[in-house]
Amino acid sequence: MKCLIHLFRSIKTNSILGLLAITSFTALQSVAQTKQLRDVQHQYNLNPNSSLLSRVTDTPDDVLKKFRDAGMAPTEHHLTDEEIAIISDAFDALPLLHQRVLKQHLKSISFLDNMPNTALTSPVTRDEDINLYHITFRSGILHQTISEWVTEKERTCFAGGDSTVSVSIQAGGLHALTYVMLHEGTHVVDGSLHLISADTVSGKAQRNVFTANFSKDVWKNINSYDWLVRDSIVLQSRFRPGGRLFLLTEAASVYAGLAQTPFVSLYSTASWHEDLAELLTIYHLTHVLRQPFRFVVKQNGKEVYSFEPMGNTLIKKRTGLLQRFYGLS
């Protein structure tokens, strides 16, 4: 009996020592990572204590060069006081985790006139472990509501067909920048914390809890699916490799198909990073900001089909993971 007691005490002591060693290593690792982050911030002149609004600046030359090399010529947008207030409101509407991470990793943002796309999140650093970002926004969204902007974007998925059919999204009257800032901010959080990461050789999900849970039964890797319904019309959208524009006469079928998937929007199907950004954005819009998000198909002005993705059981099963963005898990 004494031998057993001695053995148990020995095991307990070794376990405690092992736990202390792991805790000490984790603490040292955290200190090292914090120092590395501070060094990178200093190198790139990012003051983490500065307000997010103070980081509005001119567009970096390397970002402008990307557009010019593609034959485009966007120009710097000079903000009015009203527009600055809209930007401030968009920052204030972000979830807690977004605000914390952006303070540490968002180097700057800027606005361009005549920009072809809505937003571009660009890495500033080349360090593999520490990422800082610049976000460029098309200035036009400062004067659109979310409903106007998401409807405009959604209609780019359709071309031709019955002109009596229309597609729209009812998403409330908040400024479009609120939605786009949520979406692009999620990319910054994702990239900074490596929430969804992939093996650089095989593209398979790494064994971190968030990646495993988020991709389970949905994604094999960054843009390959792992769910049962693989012949859905949704997978033919322009956001998928080899995709196409839908006919307006297909609109009701498209959204009926979307309702059978774990995706909150057509754009969610582009990759697992866009999936996360869209899911978080529309969840925050509907559950926190209390705005609607509803796809509507009309013919001759009469509603023939509608769909609210946040009511989809397949999507509800995934929203528990989003509590991490609110400091609840």
Image (tube, rainbow, N blue to C red):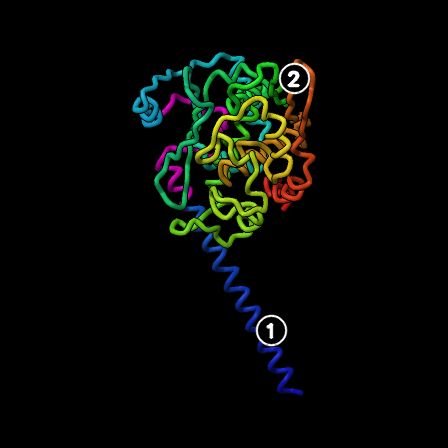
Residue numbers of the magenta segment: 36-60
Q: Secondary structure at mark 1?
A: helix
Asked whether residue 214 is in view, the answer is no
Q: Is residue 59 magenta?
A: yes
Viewer-closest of 321 and 28: 321
Q: Secondary structure at mark 2?
A: strand
Q: Amino acid at mark 1?
A: Lys
Structural distance between the alpha carbons of marks 1 and 2? 72 Å
Whole-percent x, y for residue 163 in the image? 57, 14
The reply to whether callout 1 and callout 2 are in contact (CB within 8 Å) is: no
For label 1, count other residues whose C-alpha is less than 10 Å away and answer few (under 14), some (14-19) or many (20+).
few
Image height of 35 relative to 185, above or below: below
Whole-percent x, y for residue 9 in the image? 61, 77
Identify the image quadrant of residue 37: top left
| Left or right of 63 on screen, residue 319 | right
Q: Is residue 14 magenta?
A: no
Residue displayed at 31% across by 20% down: 71
Q: Which mark is residue 12?
A: 1
Which residue matches tag 2? 299
Whole-percent x, y for residue 74 in the image? 37, 17
Quadrant assignment for the N terminus:
bottom right
Q: Earlier in the sequence, mark 1 or mark 2?
A: 1
Image height of 228 relative to 235, above or below: below
Q: Amino acid at mark 2?
A: Gln
Residue displayed at 50% across by 22% down: 156
Identify the image quadrant of residue 149: top right
Q: Which mark is residue 231?
A: none
Viewer-closest of 82 and 189: 189
| Left or right of 187 on screen, residue 311 | right
> Which one is in front in this view, the residue at disc 1 or the one at disc 2?
2
